[in-house]
Amino acid sequence: MKSGMKGLSSQLINIYDRIKHLEIQSARNIMRMALLAYIQELEYCDAKTYKRRMKQAFNALTSARPTEPMMFNALSVCMEVVNKYDYDMAREHIELLSTRILDKLIDDKEKISLFGTRMIHKQSKIMTICHSSTVVAVLTEAHRQGKEIEVYSCETRPRWQGHITSQELASAGIKVNMIVDGAMGHYIDDVDIILVGCDAVDKHGNFVNKIGTRSLAELAKNHHKKFYVAGELLKLDHRYPIPIEFRDVNEVADPTLFKGVNILNPAFDLVPAKYVTAFITEKGIIKPKQFYKMAVKELKRLIS
């Protein structure tokens, strides 16, 4: 157990471990589970200790996955409430705020799926990478509307999150071709558009997504393909540059089998805004330079 987690509830520590070890995946699920764990931690507090304990809970949860601003932003607005009010009032306000955030999650996903479908032609071939529940929602909605779509899903080494995307799309009745990441260039001329999710977006409209996304973005640019990024405005990351998380090398290979080899395992790519045709958000289709201003406004609206 990390020293900074001493004294926190076993429930919160369990959620921390599950997020850190990728048992809970996708920004939306991570935010939802972290928010519920944070709220539950209030039950273990009293009027004298709750500010310290809730700050400790905030630090612990947000350290589990540093490239998850959606979780960070949701917990940050809750921390503002903790810092502003006494214990009883804070509990009341946080419960209302958390309900608003969780309802917003559902509403935003539906809006993004409808806006995203507009970017897909009646007959389209689409390439994607990794697993994004938002991207899956867009493609499923397009299929539901009767559009004939075919998806090329990169399997996404080293954790193979693309397997999840492929399975979910196939279950929805969508034609899916799963390819190794290195084959994205082989099939780029066969697709019409690229559609990916995002984990974080900085103040300039650069975004972070699973490793391999930058290669896909550069391919799209060189082959004159539109490159769309689907994600909520809550994915704004105020850090610049956004730090890239490096994960355990054992995800790539057993280091004992590669003596003298330095194994590198960056989990994410930082993709420059110049490669992005548009972001698909709950507020509509926007250019990268619009993301920051709209996201700040949305965060302020959450706590107003």
Image: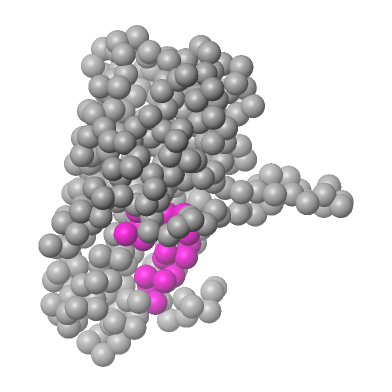
Question: Secondary structure of the magenta portion, mostly?
Answer: helix
Residue drawn where x is 24% and y is 48% of the image: 294
**Residue 31 vertical placement versus 287 (above, below):** below
Seen in the image, is 37 located left or right of residue 94? right
Q: Quadrant of the C terminus?
A: bottom left
Q: Position of residue 88 (x, y in %)?
A: 15, 80
Which is more toward the observer, 55 or 195?
A: 195
- Above or below, comparing residue 63 to residue 274 in the picture: below
Q: State the residue in front, 261 or 4.
A: 261
Residue 7 appears at what percent x and percent y? 43, 81
Q: Is residue 3 above or below residue 60?
A: below
**Residue at the image point whose x is 32% and y is 18% from the top:** 120
Quarter assignment of residue 287: top left
Is residue 18 visible to us here? no
- Residue at 30% in and 66% down: 76
Q: How many marks are shown on the rendered structure?
A: 0
| Residue farthest toward the bottom in the current orientation of the protein | 48
> Which residues are drawn in magenta?
56-73
From the image, which quarter does the N terminus lie in?
bottom right
Residue farthest toward the right in the current orientation of the protein: 259
Q: Residue at x 38, y 73 (%)?
A: 57
